[in-house]
Amino acid sequence: MEKIMISGFSDEISSDFDEQLKVVTGLGMEYISLRTADGKSIADYTAKEVTEKLLPKLKDAGVRVSSLGSPIGKVEIGDEEGFAKQLVQLEELCRIAKVLDCRYIRIFSFYIPEGRNPEDYREAVIEKLIKFDAVAGTYGVVLIHENEKGIYGDGKERCRVILDALGSDHFKAVFDFANFVQCGEDPAECWKLLHDQVVYIHIKDAVVSDKENVLCGTGEGKIKEILERAVREEGYEGFLTLEPHLVVFDALKSLELADADSIIRENKATDGAEGYAMQYHALKEILNAIEC
């Protein structure tokens, strides 16, 4: 377990960056995934702003950044203006990653028009992802594709298509248990197909019945089963990043295409800080059980 590190989307604690760092360090955590800070998406920051406003606070708190939780690729596949804007944003995100000594930038593979066959858009998706990959290669960072609901690469088969087509050291996979559950997939089968390209894991769970997010280990994401296989049998090393989704937090409505009420039907903690701590301790229990 020495090479397993726990991180988390700290904006689920609070929109206030100081409060995020206070809660994280109080739990003894040394990493965060930086998605929004002080109510602003990391994709809307400049490297200069991060250097001046965020980096000093991170250093003072003794906290490092495991990944940038960017919205890159969260646009409609036919939105050429949006894609062009994101290419520019990705350049700046790569510069931010360098400022923060951060290796990974989370991305997506474009929303598909409702009612259309995703396979009709395969070539367009791959063509645009290759352009993202070229930017990452220039800066020596790694883009990690998340299996988000409603995008081209939401299910395991199309995730595999993307990974095989890119075939790049600068393009790998994030594994999100809950997203696969919410897409009607068996996470164990997804892991079996994709694990050789997974370099980063999100700790988020869900139930099949209403697709609601729940405390990790209590849903149908098979988190303990898969982590045990990954760590003990396959030698997974790297980050496990908390993404609790247990309370409606400030940034949620801007992050989810669907109504937030369908993701979190009722708060499962009094506030974001408590929900984050609940997820952290639940993950620690799972890891302790695996280690024993």
Image (tube, rainbow, N blue to C red):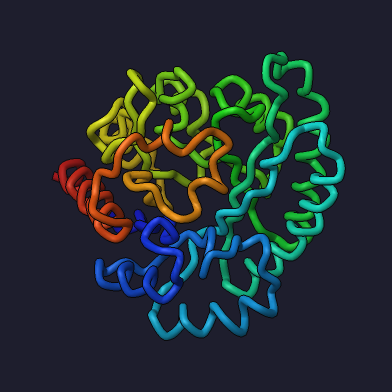
Q: Quadrant of residue 7?
A: bottom left
Q: Nearer the viewer, residue 258 or 135?
A: 258
Q: Residue at x 70, y 63 (%)?
A: 94
Q: Does 208 sit above or below residue 125? A: above
Q: Does 54 sit above or below residue 156? A: below
Q: Quadrant of residue 19?
A: bottom left
How many numbered discs? 0
Q: Nearer the viewer, residue 11 or 93?
A: 11
Q: With 182 as the anchor, is 256 left or right in this view?
A: right
Q: Nearer the viewer, residue 168 or 72?
A: 72
Q: With 221 as the anchor, is 52 left or right in this view?
A: right
Q: Quadrant of residue 62?
A: bottom left
Task: State the image coordinates of residue 140 (x, y, percent, origin top left).
Answer: 70, 60
Q: Residue at x 51, y 85 (%)?
A: 56
Q: Does 245 sit above or below residue 97? A: above
Asked if residue 18 can be seen in this view, the reply is yes
**The residue positioned farthest toward the left in the image shown:** 292
Task: State the image coordinates of residue 155 (x, y, percent, origin top left).
Answer: 55, 23
Task: State the image coordinates of residue 87 (x, y, percent, origin top left).
Answer: 80, 52
Asked if residue 240 can be seen in this view, the reply is no
Task: State the image coordinates of residue 151 (x, y, percent, origin top left).
Answer: 63, 30
Quarter of the rendering occupied by the C terminus: top left
Q: Residue at x 16, y 42 (%)?
A: 289
Q: With 269 as the anchor, is 118 left or right in this view?
A: right
Q: Nearer the viewer, residue 48 or 116?
A: 116
Q: Residue at x 48, y 33 (%)?
A: 195
